[in-house]
Amino acid sequence: MFGFLNLDKPFDWTSHDCVAKTRKLLRIKKIGHAGTLDPAATGVLPIAIGKATRLLQFLPTDKAYKATIRLGMQTTTDDLQGEVISQKSASDLDLTAVKTALLQFKGKIEQIPPNYSAIQVDGKRLYDLARKGEKIAAPVRNVEVFNIDILDWRTGTFPELDINIACGGGTYIRAIARDLGMILETGGTLAALQRTASSGFNLIDSVNFNELEAKLEAGTFQPMAADAPLQHLSQITLGEIEARKWSQGQKICLDKQVSEVARVYNEEGLFLGISEFKEELLIPRIVLEIGNN
C-alpha cells in the first residue's frame, strides 16, 4: 500500500503523534508527513504512506488557515499555550485600525519566527533553546501572504479577530498574531488555528482518526493516489520501451523541451515516478513503478 492520507489533525496532538498513530493503524512503518502543525492547531496534515514518502519533497508548499487572534495579550509562545507576558485592555481598539494594520502583512514580507518553533539555529531547535532559558535571535525569513480575509470581529477587554489567510510555505501565523499586536501597540497572540488547506489537500476532503478507523474496520480504506497532490507538475507519457528503460534507471533522450521536474507515466496511465530534465535527457529521480515489464 502506498499513497496519501488527508488527515484532520486533532487538537493537542503533535504531528509526530499523528504519524505514530497512523503507523499503528495501517501497520506500515514507512509513514511521513508534510508541513508540521503545532499541537494546539487542528486541520489538514498530509500523511504519506509507504514509498509515497519519497514524494513529500515535491508537494506544493502553499497553505491556508482559519485563525483567531486575541489582542491586548502577549505570551511567551505567541499563542495561548504559553505564559502571559503582558496584558492590558484593548477595548478601545476598532476594526478600522485592525484592517489598516493587516495590510502590512499582505505580499512578500520579512518575518521573525516565534522563539518556540522548530527552526534550527546552529543545529539546535529554537523551542529546545527557549525551554532551557537561552535567548537566541531567530533568523529573519522571507515569506509570502497571498490573501487575508476578515471573518469576524468581537469587541471586549481582549478583542478577537477571526481571519482566513492564504500563504506560502514557512509562514508562521503565530508570528502574524504577535506582529499585529505590536503594530497596534496592544500586544497580540494566537487564540486558535485550523489549517484548511496544505500542499494540495483540503479540509473538506480530510478524515479524522475515528473515520479512518471505521474505514479500516469496514475494509473500505484506500489511500489517495500518489500523484493526486502532484498535479502542479507537468506530465510526460513514455512509450513501452522508453517507460521500461526509464523505470530501470536509464536516461531517456527527448527531442522536445519539458519542465525541469515532471510526473512520468506509461501509455496505460500508470504513474511511474518523478523525472528531472537536463540537457535533453529525461533522468529518473524517483521511480515508484516498473513500466511495461
Image (tube, rainbow, N blue to C red):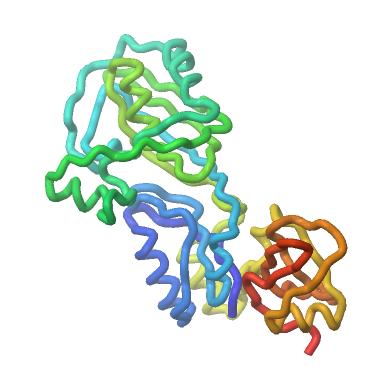
Quadrant that contains the C terminus: bottom right
- Residue 285 visible: yes
- Residue 158 visible: no
Q: Residue at x 41, y 68 (%)?
A: 19
85 vs 62, left or right, is left
Residue 156 point in image, percent of width and height: 31, 18
Looking at the image, which is closer to me, 280 or 52?
280
Q: Residue at x 52, y 26 (%)?
A: 106
Q: Residue at x 70, y 84 (%)?
A: 248
Q: Quadrant of residue 189?
A: top left
Q: Residue at x 52, y 30 (%)?
A: 108
Residue 29 point in image, percent of width and height: 44, 80
69 vs 99, left or right, is left
93 vs 235, left or right, is left
144 vs 268, left or right, is left
Looking at the image, which is closer to me, 209 or 61?
61
Residue 204 point in image, percent of width and height: 60, 51
Q: Is residue 155 above or below residue 107?
A: above
Q: Quadrant of residue 275?
A: bottom right
